Image (cartoon, rainbow, N blue to C red):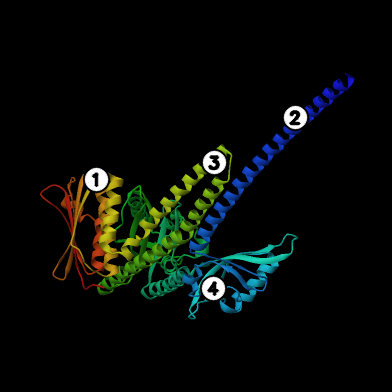
Amino acid sequence: MNGMKHLDKTKEVLINELQDLQQQYNSLKAAYDKDLTERKQAEEALRDSEEKYRTIFENVQDVFYQTDLTGIIREISPSIKYFSEFNREELIGSSVYETYYQGDDRDALLNEIIKNGEIKDYELRLKTKTGKLKHVSINARLISDAVGRPDHIDGAIRDITKRKLAEEAMLHSEASLAEAQQIAHIGSWEWDMISDIMKLSNEMYRVLDLHPENFDGKSESLIKVFHPDDAKSFIDGMKVNLSGGNLPSMEYRVIHRDGSIHTLSAKSRIEFNEAGKPVRSIGTAQDITVMSEQEFKSTLEQMRQLTQYIEKVREDERVAISRELHDDLGQALTAVKIDLGIIRQNVPDKEVVLKINKLSALVSETIKTVQRITSQLRPELLDDLGLEAAIEWYTKEYAKRNGVKVILDMDPGIECSPNVSLHIFRIMQEALTNIARHSGAARIDIRLSKTGNFLNFRISDNGIGINENEIKSKTSFGIISMKERATSIGGTLEVYNENDSGTVIKLAVPLNNP
C-alpha cells in the first residue's frame, strides 16, 4: 500500500517536471521563432539596401571606386565607360595612378589620402582611353580593417570638365571685356538693389575718378561724386529703376578729385524677379566731355556693342549657373531623397517615419524649385529642341501661372541660329511679363511664321491696349529693351494697338542673320 502511494507521488513529480520542461520548451521556441523572424526581416532589409545600393552604384553619373593602398583598382562603377572610354573590366586589377591619372598631381593625391585619412573636392586631371584630358573632382576616404589597420581606399569621381571650361571662358570674357572697356573708355556697373551694393568695372572707377579701396559699394556713396545740380536727376533715375524699368541714355556731370568737371553718357537696364519686383540693374557710362558730334555717334555705337557684349557674357553666366544647379545641386538632392527612402525602409518608429516622409516631401519640392530656376535661367529645350519647343513650354507654364489663355500658331520646321532663337525667346519673355503686369488680358495669341527670307513673330492680347505716348515714351523700358534686342539681330520691332483694343508686338528678323 505504501509502495502504491510512493509510486503515485513519483508520477506526480514527473508530471510536474514534464510540464516545466514543456513550458521551457515553449518559451525557448517562441524566442527562437522571434529571433528567426527578426533575422529574416534584417536579411530582407539588407538585401533591399544592397539592391538599392547596387542600383545607385550602377546608374549614377558619378564614378565610385575602391582601390588598395597602392592604387590597384578592386571595384569601379560601370559609369566609368561614359566617363573615360575605359570598360569597367579593363580597369579592375590595374593601377588607377598609372592607367588613368595624369601628371604629378596623382602622387600628391595618394599622399594626401594616406596622411589625412580622406580628401574632399580634390581637383585634378584624368586622361581617357583615347588620350583626352578631363577635369575631375575627387572625394576619397581611407578605410581600416577590423583591428584598425589601413586596408583600402573608397572614392568617388565627378566630371567637372564643363564647369572648368565655362570658368575659363568666363575669365577670358572678363579679360576681353576689360580690354574693350579700356580701349573705348566705357565703364560698366552692376547694382544689386536688394543689398544696395554696386560693383564697378576698372574702367568705371577711372571714369568716376574713384579708388576701389575708398568706395564702399553703396549707391549713396556714388552720389557724392556727382555735380550738385545733377545729383537730383541721378536720384530720380534710381527711383525709376526701383519702381520698375530701364533708364534711357542720360547725361550726368561728375567732379574729379582735381576739381575738373566731366560729363558722362550713361545707360542702364533693369532685371525683375518672378514677383515683378526690380532686383538688379546693370549699365554703362562713358566720359563724353570733349567729344565732337561724330565722336559722340561713334561712342553711342560702341556703347550699343558693349551692351550686346555684356548681354552675351550674362547669357554665358546664366548657362554656367544653370548647369551647376542641375549637375551638382539637382543630383545631390536626388541622392538625399534616395537615402531617405532607404532609411525609411529600416526604421520601425512611426513618428520617425512621418518626419522622414515630411523631409522627403520637402526635398522633392526643393528639386522642383531647382528645376524651375534652372529652366528660367536657360531653358534646356531652347538648346536641345529649338525655339518652337521652348515657346510651347514657356507659354504653357505662363498660362498656368497667370490664369490666361495662350493660343499658339507656329509653322513647323522653322530653323534659325541659336543667337536669333535666344533673342526671340527673351523678347517673348519681356512681352509676356509686360502683358501680365499692365494689360489685364484674358487671351494672348502668338504667331511664328516664315515669309520669304524673314521670320515673323507676332504677339497680340485682348487687354486694355497701349496709347501712342506710352509707345514712344523714354520710360517705356520694356519696349526699349525689346527693340534693342531686335536691332542686335538685324530685325525690326513694332508695337501698336489693334482695333482700339489690345496690343500687338510684331517682330521681323532675316533668317540669314547669325
Q: Is residue 487 left or right of residue 54?
A: left
Q: Amino acid at mark 4?
A: Glu
Other residues around mark 4 within 10 Å, as few (<14) / some (14–19) / many (≥20): few
CA–CA distance between discs 4 and 3?
Answer: 40 Å
Quarter holding the C terminus is bottom left
Q: Where is mark 2, residue-wise?
A: 19
Residues at marks 2 and 1, CA–CA distance in whole angstroms: 82 Å
Q: Which quadrant of the figure has residue 450?
A: bottom left
Picture coordinates of residue 233, whole percent (x, y): 33, 54
Going by the picture, which residue comes out furthest to the bottom? Answer: 131
Secondary structure under tag 4 reads helix
- Looking at the picture, how far across and down is residue 437, in whole percent? 27, 47
Q: Assess disc 3: are there few (<14), some (14-19) or many (≥20) residues with their C-alpha within 10 Å of its C-alpha.
A: some
Mark 4 or mark 1: which comes first in sequence?
Answer: 4
Residue 288 makes an appearance in the image: no
- Residue receiving disc 4: 89
